[in-house]
Image: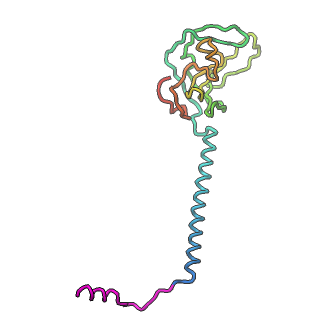
């Protein structure tokens, strides 16, 4: 009883107005769709340009520290080997604190990361690498801190100094000190002891 009358009331037509579809509505929705796609595309182009800009600056090293100060504790290596070109190999005591001081990026890179070169301790400038009399006046060769991909570590090296006289030490990274294994690009992010 109640359901028949309820059904009859709900199915009766009370409005006689019909809403007609606009002829321009399809064209209008297509324009809006194209406009939204264009906005999305412009956002994509803007984000890609920003990413390319930052990536290029990062690959040039613009976001890495340009200078570091190195303080090595009182460490001594008693059997280091000094191989100066044109002279015999000498065994010497290596005093690591001798290499304390400022190290600056020299613009070069090794294994995709910057190389830091020791600076003059008195005025912070680069060492003079030329000598008026190379036979009698030795030129100070600066130490370097660089990343070596082969051992996955940042290393402290010197062109003439080795830890031992073994041929095994003549890799592309004959290190005097090294960090723990790491893949970080910025030397300031290196964790742990050397």
Percent coordinates x, y for residue 193 in the rendering:
48, 24
117 left or right of 184 in image: right
Which percent across, then down, holds residue 36?
56, 67
Q: Residue at x 47, y 86 (%)?
A: 19
Q: Count the marks: how many?
A: 0
Do we see residue 49 in this rendering? yes
Assess whether residue 13 is covered by the magenta stretch. yes
Q: Is residue 121 visible?
A: no
Outermost residue to the left: 1
Quadrant in the picture for residue 121:
top right
Q: Nearer the viewer, residue 67 or 27?
A: 27
Q: Residue 34 appears in which quarter of the rendering? A: bottom right
Q: Is residue 191 above or below residue 55?
A: above
Q: Is residue 93 above or below residue 15?
A: above
Identify the coloring: rainbow
* Quadrant housing residue 63: top right
User: In x, y percent, where is residue 68?
Assistant: 56, 29
Figure check: 179 above or below 60: above
Observer-nearest of 180 and 121 = 180
In the picture, the quarter occupied by the N terminus is: bottom left
Q: Is residue 72 left or right of residue 89?
A: left
Residue at x 49%, y 15% (from the top left corner): 74
Instruction: Inspect the magenta stretch and tell me whether residue 192 lies in it.
Output: no
Residue 106 lies, with reference to residue 56, above or below; the image says above
What segment is highlighted magenta in the picture? 1-20
Relative horizontal placement of residue 164, taking residue 20 as reference (left or right)? right
Residue displayed at 62% across by 48% down = 52
At horizontal 50% and vertical 23% (from top left) the residue drawn is: 194
């Amino acid at each position: 009883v109640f359901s028949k009358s309820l059904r009859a009331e709900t199915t009766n037509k009370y409005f006689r107005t019909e809403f007609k579809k606009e002829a321009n509505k399809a064209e209008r929705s297509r324009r809006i769709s194209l406009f939204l796609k264009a906005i999305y595309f412009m956002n994509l182009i803007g984000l890609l340009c920003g990413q390319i800009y930052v990536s290029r600056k990062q690959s040039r090293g613009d976001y890495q520290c340009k200078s570091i100060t190195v303080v090595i504790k009182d460490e001594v290596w008693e059997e280091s080997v000094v191989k100066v070109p044109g002279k015999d190999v000498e065994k010497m005591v290596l005093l690591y604190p001798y290499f304390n001081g400022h190290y600056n990026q020299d613009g070069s890179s090794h294994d995709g990361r910057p190389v830091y070169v020791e600076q003059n301790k008195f005025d912070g400038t680069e060492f003079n690498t030329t000598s008026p009399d190379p036979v009698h006046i030795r030129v100070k060769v600066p130490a370097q801190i660089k990343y070596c991909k082969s051992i996955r570590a940042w290393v402290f090296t010197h062109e003439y100094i080795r830890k031992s006289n073994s041929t095994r030490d003549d890799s592309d990274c004959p290190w005097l000190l090294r960090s723990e294994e790491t893949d970080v690009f910025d030397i300031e992010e290196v964790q742990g002891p050397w």
